[in-house]
Image (cartoon, rainbow, N blue to C red):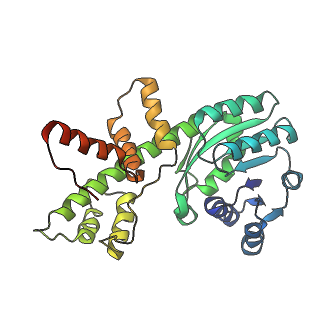
Amino acid sequence: MRIALFGLGRMGANMARRLRRHGIEVVGYNRSQEIVQRLVEEEGILPAASVAEAIDQLPAPRVIWLMLPSGAPTEQMVLDLADRLEPGDIVIDGGNSNYHDSQRRGALLAARGIRFADCGTSGGIWGLENGYCLMIGGDSDTIEVVTPALQALAPAADRGWAHVGPVGSGHFTKMVHNGIEYGMMQAFAEGFALMRGKEEFNIDLAQVAELWRHSSVVRSWLLDLTADALAQDQQLETVEPYVADSGEGRWTVIEGVDQGIATPVLALALQMRFNSQDKEGYPYKLLAMMRNAFGGHAIKQR
């Protein structure tokens, strides 16, 4: 099989490496050609300096996998490909696009006879070694064509990937996955903060994290990563208490509102990330003023 991979950032480049190591031919295109040349030398991918050059190197039906930032970059590329590809060709969006956008893009391409699949991709920088968890949406005929690539990217040919439903369902499933991830991370963070705060016990957080990794109910890959981090540094004094949100956590909470389904854990985890990003602290200043106004409580001055 030969597939084009557009977007060779940290995740896209490692996906290209994994595909090559499983015998899939990869045509690589990236705005910066430096990583393309590196992958040519390291893995033997086929280089492309332009979208047109990449398409010309693909057999019919052409398969192009996008690993681009969500939003405008993916939108512009889909529109460009809509004008370049032929009926029967396949576009896969493996980035973190909003599932509503994926449904719309699928319909746009389908009107021109071009097939589309949306693939929620999890695994991060560890995917090269461990494989990626792939949640793909699209019609069965499309998924059948790209199955060799899915099997190569996944941890094994028979696990770690699934055709979860029609176009849009792949990114929807990944969106919910990321919302759950927010909640799990928040729970671990709060629990370890509680143990650190009980100074009279002087609990070794690295020891407990390692302990919980073995046969405990809360064992998980997130705990594995936490244990590794705490083994290096328990105080985390050099880490800024700022946690970004990539967007999918927001979309998950909005989906809960749209469906009228309570998601308090996911919503609060998202709100806590917002709280970490608030450098001004204006709401707390206003709370201090209110407390002073009704109760005469002192205001701590800077």
> Where is residue 45 drawn, in percent x and y?
77, 66
Whether residue 200 sits left or right of residue 38 in the image: it is: left
Q: Quadrant of the C terminus?
A: bottom left
Q: Quadrant of the N terminus?
A: bottom right
Task: Locate residue 289: give its quadrant.
Answer: top left
Q: Is residue 1 visible?
A: no
> Where is residue 237 drawn, in percent x and y?
34, 71
> Where is residue 111 drawn, in percent x and y?
79, 27
> Where is residue 300 drawn, in percent x and y?
22, 54
Count the marks: 0
Q: Nearer the viewer, residue 18 or 266?
A: 266
Q: Is residue 201 visible?
A: yes
Whether residue 69 sits left or right of residue 46 in the image: it is: left
Whether residue 253 sits left or right of residue 195 in the image: it is: right
Task: Check the image and report above or below for 206 versus 299.
Answer: below
Task: Check the image and report above or below for 132 versus 101.
Answer: below
Residue at (37, 43) in percent of width and height: 271
Residue at (72, 28) in percent of width and height: 107
Please, which residue is most extreme toward the left here? 200
Q: Nearer the viewer, residue 106 or 34?
A: 34
Residue at (21, 50) in percent of width and height: 299
Task: Locate residue 60: give its quadrant.
Answer: top right
